[in-house]
């Protein structure tokens, strides 16, 4: 299958929007509830590491879509992880 540069650019932009839009509800919910207990720190670290590798790949092949999506993914992943760590420390239940 062959796509021209314009169509391929649209596909890249739509793919990035779809992948990154999944983070937004999680960030909003976490901000409102101040709880992210059900989010795995391990998952966040793995996704961040994968995004770093994809960023390196994007730089190597000089693909602005791959680079942009993965920079944004790294930012959103670290936002969720930072919120999780902050809220776990701040709202940790008192043990009896």
Image (cartoon, rainbow, N blue to C red):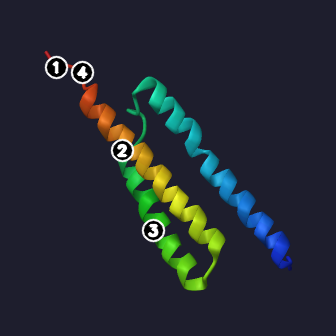
**SS for dot 4:** loop
Q: Which of marks 4 and 2 is in front?
A: 2
Residue 44 rendering spot, x and y as whole percentages:
42, 51
Q: Which of marks 3 and 1 is nearer the N terminus?
A: 3
Q: In which quarter of the image is residue 86?
A: top left
Q: Which quadrant: the C terminus?
A: top left
Q: Where is mark 2, residue-wise?
A: 82
Residue 76 rendering spot, x and y as whole percentages:
49, 50
Residue 62 vertical position relative to residue 73 in the rendered view, above or below: below
**Left or right: residue 68 compared with residue 82:** right
Q: In which quarter of the image is residue 64?
A: bottom right
Q: How far, Cα to Cα, is label 1 from label 2? A: 24 Å
Q: Earlier in the sequence, mark 3 or mark 4?
A: 3
Q: Where is mark 3, residue-wise?
A: 52
Q: How far, Cα to Cα, is label 3 from label 1? A: 38 Å
**SS for dot 1:** loop
**SS for dot 2:** helix
Q: Earlier in the sequence, mark 2 or mark 3?
A: 3
Q: Which residue is drawn at 42% across and 64% down?
A: 49
**SS for dot 3:** helix
Residue 56 vertical position relative to residue 80 in the rendered view, above or below: below
Q: Where is mark 1, residue-wise?
A: 95
Residue 71 rendering spot, x and y as whole percentages:
52, 63
Q: Where is mark 4, residue-wise?
A: 93
**Left or right: residue 88 compared with residue 9:** left
Q: How far, Cα to Cα, is label 3 from label 4? A: 34 Å
Q: Earlier in the sequence, mark 4 or mark 2?
A: 2
């Amino acid at each position: 299958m062959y796509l021209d540069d314009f169509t391929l650019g649209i596909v890249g932009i739509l793919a990035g929007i779809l992948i990154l839009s999944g983070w937004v509800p999680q960030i909003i919910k976490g901000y409102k509830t101040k709880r992210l207990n059900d989010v795995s720190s391990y998952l966040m670290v793995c996704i961040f590491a994968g995004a770093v590798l994809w960023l390196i790949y994007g730089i190597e092949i000089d693909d602005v879509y791959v680079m942009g999506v993965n920079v944004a993914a790294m930012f959103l992943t670290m936002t969720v992880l930072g919120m999780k760590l902050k809220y776990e420390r701040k709202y940790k239940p008192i043990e009896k």
